[in-house]
Amino acid sequence: MKYLIRLSYLGTGFSGFQVQKGSNARTVQQVLCDASFQLFGCDCLVSGCSRTDSGVHALDYAATIQTNSLTEIPADKLPYALNSKLPDDIVVHFAKIVSDDYSIRKQVEGKEYEYVILNTKFPSALSFDRTLHYGARKLNENLMNQAAQNMVGKHDFMAFMASGSQVEDTVRTIEYCKVTRVGDKIKINVRADGFLYNMVRIIVGTLIEVSEGKISPDEVLDIINSKDRSKAGRTVPPNGLYLKEVILK
């Protein structure tokens, strides 16, 4: 039997979603495997919709759990059963039964990420590891949003990909990229059909440098067309990044 589950997790205590070969690092995938073993009494295959980096959070993540156990748990009961075996930093909030040939990766049509910046003079203890604190100056969200619109559309985003990726096709389509201020927080939301390694974190770093006057909004398209990572902004830390929504077929 195979289940599709939707879950959320606080990324602070995890080295990303995917199990890392030769490493004992705590990952979301391994914790889900352990909980599934306790529940079904056998090893289960857990597959995720994508990787997430160490320290990145998820408000909505999709995964499948495949089991050969004779124990059958109704889909509407599975979240309760799994949550009883999971630590507090992972919560399953939906499950349904899918066919054995269902591939979660092939079902993903797009994703939305949100990056949160706390734009205050001093950091907040309650936002530790959940936002990026930026206290150097007040960020200009209007200028940042102006620059963000130049990223919308189908482009080759090689300039916004960190080194170390093995991806050959670096063309992605951004549906929207918007910057808003809510009180002392700046939120950057990016929805696309796919993302490159550290793409959102580099986009955010570039938008910050637009606000700092290091890059003009009109330069963003030139940076994209250059395909040169050195021309884009810095890579911001992962702690302010949230996988907000996974869009499935």
Image (tube, helix red, strand yellow):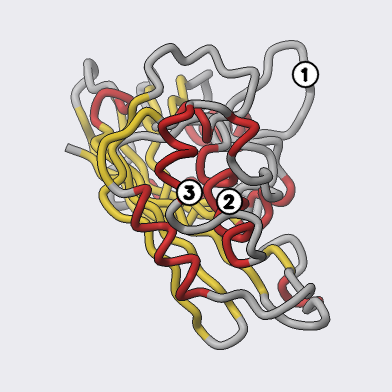
Q: CA distance from mark 3 to mark 1?
A: 41 Å
Q: Residue furthest bottom?
A: 183
Q: Amino acid at mark 3?
A: Glu
Q: Is residue 35 left or right of residue 224?
A: right
Nearest the viewer among 210 and 53 is: 210
Q: Which residue is more in the foreground, 213 or 26?
A: 213
Q: Is residue 92 above or below residue 18?
A: below
* Residue occupying the point 43% across, 59% down: 147
Precedes in sequence: disc 3 or disc 1: 1
Find disc 3 in the rendering and name its residue.
Answer: 219
Image depth: mark 3 or mark 2 in front: 3
Q: Is residue 32 above or below residue 23?
A: below
Q: Secondary structure at mark 1?
A: loop
| Among the 4 quarters of the image, the one containing residue 202 | top right
User: Decide: marks 3, 1 in contact (CB < 8 A)?
Assistant: no
> Mark 1 highlights which residue?
23
Disc 2 element: helix
Q: Nearer the viewer, mark 1 or mark 2?
A: 2
Q: Nearer the viewer, residue 105 or 168?
A: 168
> What residue would you read off at disc 2?
206
Where disc 3 sits, the SS reads helix
At horizontal 44% and vertical 36% (from top left) the residue drawn is 224
**Where the N terminus falls, by quadrant?**
top left
Whole-number angstrom distance, CA of label 1 to CA of label 2: 33 Å
Q: What amino acid type should be assigned to the residue bearing mark 1?
A: Ser
Rounded to the nearest angstrom, the CA distance separating label 3 from label 2 is 10 Å
- Bin the neighbour count of mark 3 within 10 Å (Cα to Cα): few under 14, some 14-19, many 20 and up: some
**CB under 8 Å between discs 3 and 2:** no
